[in-house]
Amino acid sequence: MKSEHIRPIPKYILTKVRQQDKKECPSQKGLRMYSYLSTIRKELVKITVAVKNHKKQWHCKQVAVHGVKSDKCYVKDMEYNYIGMGYRVGWYAEGLSPYKKWFEGHGWGYAKSKYYNSWSTVINYDYISKFAEYKYSAYQDFRGKCVIEHLKLYEKYPQVEYLLKLGLHGLHDSVTILKRIAKDKSFCKWLIANRDELKANYHYVGTILQAYKSGKSLKQTQVFNECKKRLNSDNNLSPLKELFGRELERFFSYLEVQGSTPNSYLDYLRACNYLGLDMSLPKNRYPHNFKHWHDIRIDEYATAKALADEKKREELYSKFAIVADKYMPLQKRGKNGYAIILAASPKELIHEGETLGHCVGKMGYDQKFAREETLIFFVRNTANIDTPLVTVEYSLQSKKVLQSYGHGHSKPDDTIAHFINKVWLPYANRTVKK
């Protein structure tokens, strides 16, 4: 394919583009993109056109050409905007602009084929049927961004037809999956057996291959991989990673059976470590009734701390009060009937934790607060301001909400979550910055 072989837009194509444009954009405002299929020197190509209305006149021009046999595309009067993740088109030649933009008026230039390939409706999709070599490419079932890229992939990996006909559109461009299909018939049968679940939910490619090899369910494998990913990205959970090491899969399965969370187990672990318990013993590592033993260990931990040196406790309360006074301006009353207030003392943390059934008053949050490592806020209903509702942990270092829990480690509802993350958090970050 060469630029000199690109022909003007045929009149019947212009008519189809205009019909499609009126259908997709009745307001006829802004920049729109469409595309049509054609042939250049026996090569199937997709030609992208830009459409714009100016002073009640409709304008259409070619801006990009992608060929199924070409590693490069041709582009004219169009710029890719990296910041806005979109495109700009110049209209100087059409008389729509008084001056040329820097990317206009140079004729057809070229770039790598992956660029300047905007998402657009193909108005003559059935044109592909003229090419016998793509008869079994399942192009009729293709739902992705660019059919030209799909046909390129099909030429390398004909197995893509198999995935599309199974309805596994989310996997059709995974080279890893395509290579496995080509050499492993058992894997093909496994895909058929698990087709419904693969279609219903998103799964990592690694999850799919891992589930196939291990014989475990996709759901179980996906949950494990997501938990493992979270464990690797959250430094607060690093003690769990250190403790369980190669037992992570067993650990996450245990949490699922017990109906618990990594954060809850982390609180339990810290209490056990403070009490000097041997966590290599199965009875401590995987207690039969986790909630029961979690509550016992937390109470034992609280008692042990209460017997600590009185002087140190007085120092803690004093430091806590200084920090609370310093960050009191971060409190906020919202318009939706909620308010967020800062903890004023370790005693308030204990009351909050006992009322909501979590560990904010028992697991060293008072110490972290006094060191300004974290701040604890209480979300309350303004109509009942003294009743605990949701507890929020805020990091002064990362300027993020680390966790927010209601009764029994439950997640706050959408209204409260919106108030915390969209209303209060930006306000708190601005206030801290000041």
Image (cartoon, grey):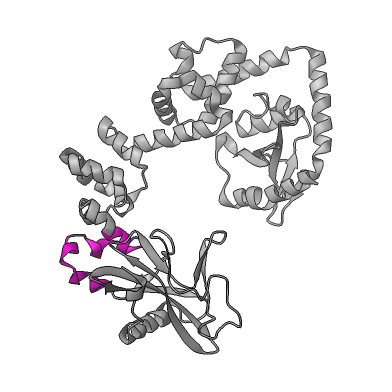
Q: Would residue 181 appear left or right of 376 to someone viewing this image?
A: left
Is 300 situated above or below 405? Answer: above
Instruction: Name the outermost residue toward the bottom.
Output: 56
**Quadrant in the picture for residue 14:** bottom left
Residue 424 x/y as whole percent: 70, 49
Q: Residue at x 19, y 44 (%)?
A: 182
> At x 61% / y 83%, what residue is drawn?
98
Residue 312 visible here: yes
Q: Position of residue 394 (x, y in %)?
A: 68, 38
Is residue 143 inside the magenta stretch? Answer: yes
**The quarter of the displayed image where residue 61 is located:** bottom left
Q: Is residue 294 left or right of residue 137?
A: right
**Along the horizontal axis of the image, is 100 left or right of 317?**
left
Q: Is residue 60 above or below residue 172?
A: below
Nearest the viewer among 316 and 34 is 34
Q: Which residues are magenta?
A: 125-151
Main SS of residues in magenta: helix
